[in-house]
Structures are given as C-alpha cells and as structure tokens.
Image (tube, rainbow, N blue to C red):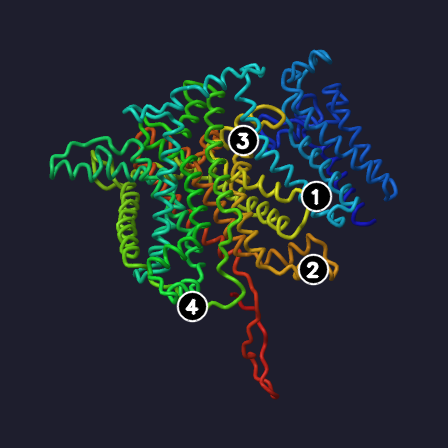
Amino acid sequence: MNAYNRRLTGALAAGAIALLLLPWYSLEEGFFAGGWLLSLWSEGDSASALWQLATGQHPWLSIVVILYLACGACALLAPGPLRRRALFACSLTGVLFLVVEGHAIGYSGWSWLWLENLLGPLEQGQPAMGAGAVLMLTTFLLIFSYALAERGVLKGDAFVVSAIVLLVALVTTFVLYPVLSLFIVSVQDVDGSFQPDGLLTNMRDPAIWSLACFSGGNCGTAWRTLGLALMTASGSTLLGLAFALAATRTPLPCKKALRMLTILPIITPPFVIGLALILLFGRAGIVTETLATLFGIEPGRWLYGLTGIWIAQVLSFTPVAFLVLIGVVEGVSPSLEEASQTLRANRWRTFSRVSLPLMAPGLANAFLISFIESMADFGNPMVLGGSHGVLSTEIFFSVVGAQNDPSRAAVLAMILLCFTLAAFIIQRLWLSGKSFTTVTGKGDGGKHGHLPGPVRYGVYGMVIPWGLFTLVIYGMIIVGGFVESWGLNNNLTLDHYIRAFRVTFNDGHLVWSGVAWNSFWTTLEIALIAAPLTAIVGLLTAWLIVRQKFAGRQTFEFMLMLSFAIPGTVIGVSYIMAYNLPPLEITGTGLILVACFVFRNMPVGVRGGVAAMSQLDKSLDEASLTLGANSFRTLRKVVLPLLKPAISAALVYAFVRAITSISAVIFLVSAQYNMATSYIVGLVENGEYGVAIAYSSVLIVVMLTIIVLFQLSIGERRLRRATQPASAPAASAPTSLTQESAV
C-alpha cells in the first residue's frame, strides 16, 4: 500500500468514526462531559448520524453518507485521472453540502425563507454541528487535499497541500466568517430578514459623528476615539523611541533595569494601570489628598475622562513601541553615520537626515500597533472613561447593556474596523517602494555616533521622569493590595489576598474557597491550551509562507495579518454574532475562548517564524528531502529544532495575551468560563479595588513563573560543536571529544 492509499484509508477511517461513534450535533452539556456515550444509540440529538437515519430523523444526512461511500468507492479505483477527478468531485461536494446544509437548516426548520417557499416547510430542524459533523467535514477536506496532491499540486506533497487546505479553512472560519457575519447582522432585522434601516439610522446618529467639540460641546464617539488613538499612538511612539535611544545611544546607567521596567506593563492586566492612577490622582488618591491638605486644592475629577485614558494608554503601550523600535535603532548602520560626519555634517544633521529616516519602518509599525491597541482598549476606558465613552465601551453597552441593540453594536464595530484597516493600509502604502536596508553581508565594524546634545537631554528629560512615574505606578499596584480601603482606611491588611485566594480544609479535603479561584483556574487552563496551539499554527503557517510557493500565497498572508489589524473588541462582537446560532454554536464554551486567542495572537507567531525561518538556508530542507525524508519529518526533525527562539517567543506572547486580554473576552466569557480579566473588571465596577489589585499582582507573579518554565522546557537551539578535552588522556597525540554546545 503506497503513501496516498494509507492516507486515504486513515481519512476514511476518521469518517467512519464520525458517522458511527460520535454525536453528530452539539450537546448542551458539552462533548467532554461524556454523557453522550450512554445515549449514542438512542433517539435524540446526541445520537450518531447513522443511528439518526435508522430512526427516521434528519433524512438529509443520507446525502452525507452517500458522498462518504462515494469517496470510499473512488479510493478503490486504480490510480489515474479517473480516480483523481472522482475523489476531487466527491470530497468538494461533501464540503459544500455540509457548509450549505448547516446554514440552511436551523432549529425550527429552514433558515432561508426562499427555500421554504421552494421546498415546503420541514417537519423538524437541527441543532448546530457537533463532534461528528466537524470530524466529517475535516475528513472531506483531507480527501480533497489528497486528490489535489495526486494531481501533482505542490509536487504531489500531500502533507503540504493538506496543511494549506486546513489552514485556509480555519482562517476562513475564525477570521473572515465572523467579520462577514458582523456586516450581515448590521442589515438584519430581529427575525433575520433584510432590514437596512438600523444600519442607516445608526450611521447617521449624531452621537457617533457629532463635531460639536469645535463649538464647545462634546465630539461624537467616533471622532473622540480616533483623536484619542492618534494622541496615544504619537505619545507611545515618541516615548518608545526615547527609551530605545536611551538604551542604545546614551551612557545612561542601569540600562538593564530600564529594559525590565519597559517590559513590566506587557505582563500587567491592561486596566490595572488605570486602577493605580485612581489610587494616585482619584478624588481619594494620595496625591489629591496631599495637595488638598498642603495647598487647599479642591479634589477634582480631571482624571475621569480622555486625559486619564490617554495617560493610562501611553503607560500601557509604550513598552510595545519600545520593543518594536529597539531593534530598528540598533540596526542603523554606524558606517552611514560615520560617512555623514566625514562629509562634515554635524551630529544633528546626521541624526535628522540619516539615522531618523532609516528608522521609519520601526516608527510606522510602532505607531500602527499603538493606534490599533488604543482603538481596541477596553479596560482603561472602562475604568477611567466616566461619561466620555469610546467605541469599545459603547459596543460593550450596546451588546450587554439595557440597549440590547446588536445592529448598533455591529455598526460601531464596523466603524472601528474601518479606522484600523485605514491606518493599516496607509502604513503599507507609505512604506511600499522604499528601501531601508542598512545591514548587508559586508562587515560593519563602526560605532554608533553620540546623539546631538539637545536630543540627548530631551531623551533624558522624557525617560527619567517617565521611568520614575512608572515605578511609582507599580509601587501603588503593590501597596494597593495591602491597604484596607484606599482613602478611607489606609491600614495594612492581608484580607484582600485572603478573600481572593483562601484555601481551607473541610472533612480532610482541600477546598479552594477564595472568590478568585474559579476564574483563576479557568484562565490558566484556557491560556495553557491556547498558547501551544497558537505556536503550532503560527509556525506551521510561517513555514508554508517561507518554504512553499503556491497560488494565492500573498492573499493567504494578508488574510492572516487581517486578524492582527482587527481590534479585539470587533473580534469579540463578531464571534458572538457568528457563533451564537447554527452551524457552529460555541458561544459560552471554552472552545470559543481558545479559538479567539489562537487566531487573534497567531499573526505574531507567524511574523516571528517568518523572520527566524528566513535566516535558515533552504539547503537544510533540501538535504533532508534528498535523503528520503518527507516534508513532515523534515519540519519536525530539521526546521523546528532550529526555531526554538521563535517557538519560545510565540508561546510566551500567546500565553501572556491570553491572560491579560480583555477587549475580546469581555464579550465571550460565561458563568462557567469566566476569565480573570473579566472577573477583575467586575470587581472594579463594584468598587472592590483592593481585591482587584491583589488578584492582578498574583497574575503577574504567575505569568513570570510560567514564562521562565517555558524558557527552561524549550531550551536553546544548538548550532555548532565545541571541542573540549577528553575526560581520559590518550597515549597518542592529544584528542578531543566534540560536544554540542548551546549558543
């Protein structure tokens, strides 16, 4: 039996399991509860597809069985054009039928009125797809991939073809489909009929587009959000550049501590900085009370509004801009700066005309990332916004508030998406056609020149006060968890930690009785599941983009980066609207959280994998393939061991983002699956600042611990052999044993 037949046999075996041994439809208690094992061959939606057909339920499933048997019959044909065409047609028909049937038939019958008029009403509907239907759809996709491989696509490499087909299916399902659902809901009535009135009414709403701020009033939500995002992106990029210059071009002491200080906000839940600002500058804050005592200044509410949101966002997103810019600043070739000074340009002219323009890609990327993060930020506006709502908070209240207006939420999300995509496209157009290459294969032994005096003192003037301010903020975060009630009773206590993480013994059993344990274990479980999946999908995608040439590769890459350009708030709303009804009904489950994290954070793993893989010579892959290894073995044995830094970075980023994310998960959490960030937001809304800060402090410690464990478990890649003396002396000439050494 050749490799193609073995793969086909495996796919057909999976299809048999889907039809015989798995519940075809989704279960209210969940698949992993295991209750379906007792009702698999009984009447009801938990039965397998074949048993439902045998008992006269859902007769349209017979078409799925016929298509599956047709694929099995095609596999028995002799290899040749007929078998290839037959497998291709049967599998593609199976995929299309399952997708269309899942959308066309809902709980109460036909989902589309024209089908009911054409075919008449159905006696019964169907729930959403379950494990059996999803596995059957995967089976048809695999058979479709193998048919393409037999036709010679991508040199007949079945692993590569199937990986591309499955990834395209996943990206379409969890990135494009939710966004499309968002647009559809905006023009739908409650009963699902086409009704654009809600879209038109909301698009013309003065509360969204008003420009009254130019005449002393309040600006609309859209312009307020756009202005805040532009200010935050400008401030974060400027401060990130200042930190990068201070770390690489100045003799500033304690540079390692400076780098650590800039990384801390990344592993901090996003709204915690807002809480610390309230403890400092709120009406009962320590600075506010000190000023009132010493100078009689009346406490105000200046912090609650755009000013407070801006300060919190700049504090939160400056570290991201710094991490983007540090490599760009270090990458500017010293020889170019030396050449400029040799031609009698002074330091300021060299910096402004040579160094700074070469940093343009990093500045553009830092600005774009900060802009998108500000647009999507939910935690800080929720804590500090007051009556000055932004698009992310308005979307939230449109979905879960008294308004209960999904059409308005969809319109606001579309506006948010248009802003971020416009920034993404403008950045791409501005950088396209320009060359910023400074590092070539030639040696460059020069040394970066000193910064001009005004620039150096300006960098010091921004970095030192901001660094001290950040230290104060984190000092407040630490102290805030130990204070009884800030501003009312400043006595130190452990009650907040005890209330959140109390552990007791009851009848000899350990009881996690603290109020935070439920969301803590849920968050840890979801993050530890999502992080490896994100790394696997991201690095596999990067390998396909760098090493394989296939039609539509650039479109595929753009689809992946689209999920990065979409704010988390839009992702959350679109997931609710896409997965709250058949064919995939996963709202309120842990699966929707895992899918959200994987496909939200995947682009970072892809870009890191592309950068790392671009440094690996293709001859390594070619040598493995020449020696008879297939693509999967080459990827597993040759490529992945050389990508340990990229794997570690993808795991760490995905894990941290899964724990600290709030803008998307605030819409997706449920009573059973409540994430830590959502729970902390609830504590803040109830005024329990001490417990919220105590919980956040524990999360920071846990994240640091698990990041270290990730680093230790993955290890470092080994690139070269180092010679070391032999343990026992030899009688002849000196010898040495070669031993792998880590770089």
Contact? badges 4 and 3 (CB < 8 Å): no
Residue 149 point in image, percent of width and height: 76, 45
10 Å crowding of disc 2: few (<14), some (14-19), many (20+)? few
**Relative to 551, is 355 above or below?**
below
- The kind of secondary structure element at disc 3 is loop
Cα gap from disc 4 to disc 3, whole angstroms: 57 Å
Which sits in the foreground, 343 or 667?
Answer: 343
Q: Nearer the viewer, mark 1 or mark 4?
A: 4
Q: Which label was assigned to residue 162?
A: 1
Q: Are marks 2 and 4 in contact (CB under 8 Å)?
A: no
Q: Nearer the viewer, mark 3 or mark 2?
A: 2
> Three-letter amino acid code at disc 4?
Gly
Residue 59, compared with residue 376, is above or below; it is: above
- Could you say whether the residue bearing mark 2 is in a helix, strand or loop? helix
- Image depth: mark 2 or mark 4 in front: 4
Residue 15 locus on image (x, y percent): 74, 35
The residue where tag 3 is placed is 589
Which badge, 2 or 4, is on the more N-terminal residue? 4
Q: In the structure shown, which secondary structural element does the residue marked by tag 1 occupy?
A: helix
Which one is earlier in the sequence, the residue at label 3 or at label 2? Answer: 3
Local crowd size for mark 4, using a 10 Å CA cut-off: few (<14), some (14–19), many (≥20): few
Name the kind of residue labelled 1 in the image: Ser
Q: Which percent across, then down, holds residue 363?
A: 42, 48
Residue at (70, 53) in percent of width and height:
631
Q: Earlier in the sequence, mark 4 or mark 3?
A: 4
- Residue 603 appears in view: yes
Determine the CA span between mark 3 and mark 2. 44 Å
The residue indicated by pointer 4 is: 446
Residue position for label 2:
622
- 100 to the left or right of 701: right
